[in-house]
Structures are given as structure tokens and as C-alpha cells.
Amino acid sequence: KFTGKGCVISTVSASLITEHIKNKTLNYVKNLNIKNITDLMKINIISTRLKCASLPLNAIIKSHNRLYQNSIDSIEKIIQNLEKSTKK
């Protein structure tokens, strides 16, 4: 279930996208585009509102990228600490 605040288009898009991407691979999600989103919504979105429709997908991808980068940073710090401790 999706809860949030925003315009109707971004709210509907977020709800549909979150349901659609369940059990999908990250690669699948990263390859979604605005056409996929508007197809899910089953309505024509005027060009000035396409950003509203794509905002939830962009947020999902950006959040994943941040989590991934934080994981890499954490792993690198662990390796550095291990290297330092073995040099002592």
C-alpha cells in the first residue's frame, strides 16, 4: 500500500508503480520509462504533467542508488580497517 502526498497523477503513478515492480529485478525497474508508466495508468498524460507521473519511479531508482552507494562505502571502510589492523 502506498501512502503519500502529492498531485493526483504522482500519487496514482506511485501506487501503480509500487504494485507493478513487486518481485521484479532491479534491472527491470531501472529500464522502465515514461511510456511504461503511462501505459500502467491507462490515461493520456499531457506533456506538462509527465514529470509528475515519472517522479515516483525516479525516486525509487535514486533511493536504490543511494543505498547501494552507502553499502559500497561501508564495505570499503571495513576493508580499509581490516587492512590497517593486519599491518599492525
Image (cartoon, helix red, strand yellow):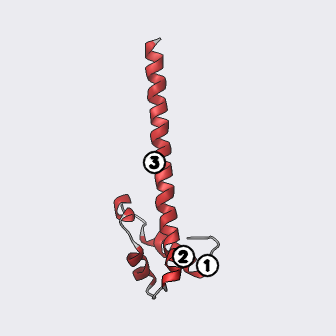
Residue for point 53% across, 81% down: 49
Residue 21 spot, x, y in % from top left: 42, 67
Residue 48 spot, x, y in % from top left: 52, 81
- At label 1, which amino acid type do we have? Cys
The quadrant of the image that shows the N terminus is bottom right
Name the foreground residue: 35 vs 78.
35
Say above or below: 74 vs 84: below
Q: Secondary structure at mark 1?
A: loop
- At label 3, which amino acid type do we have? Tyr
Residue 15 spot, x, y in % from top left: 52, 74
Q: Disc 2 and disc 1: Cα gap in Å?
A: 8 Å
Q: Are marks 2 and 1 in contact (CB under 8 Å)?
A: yes
Number of other residues with Cα within 10 Å of mark 2, as a class: few under 14, some 14 to 19, many 20 or more: some
Q: Disc 3 and disc 2: Cα gap in Å?
A: 25 Å
Q: Name the residue that disc number 2 marks.
A: 52
Indicate which disc, 2 or 1, sits on the residue closer to the N terminus.
1
Residue 10 spot, x, y in % from top left: 55, 76
Q: Secondary structure at mark 2?
A: helix
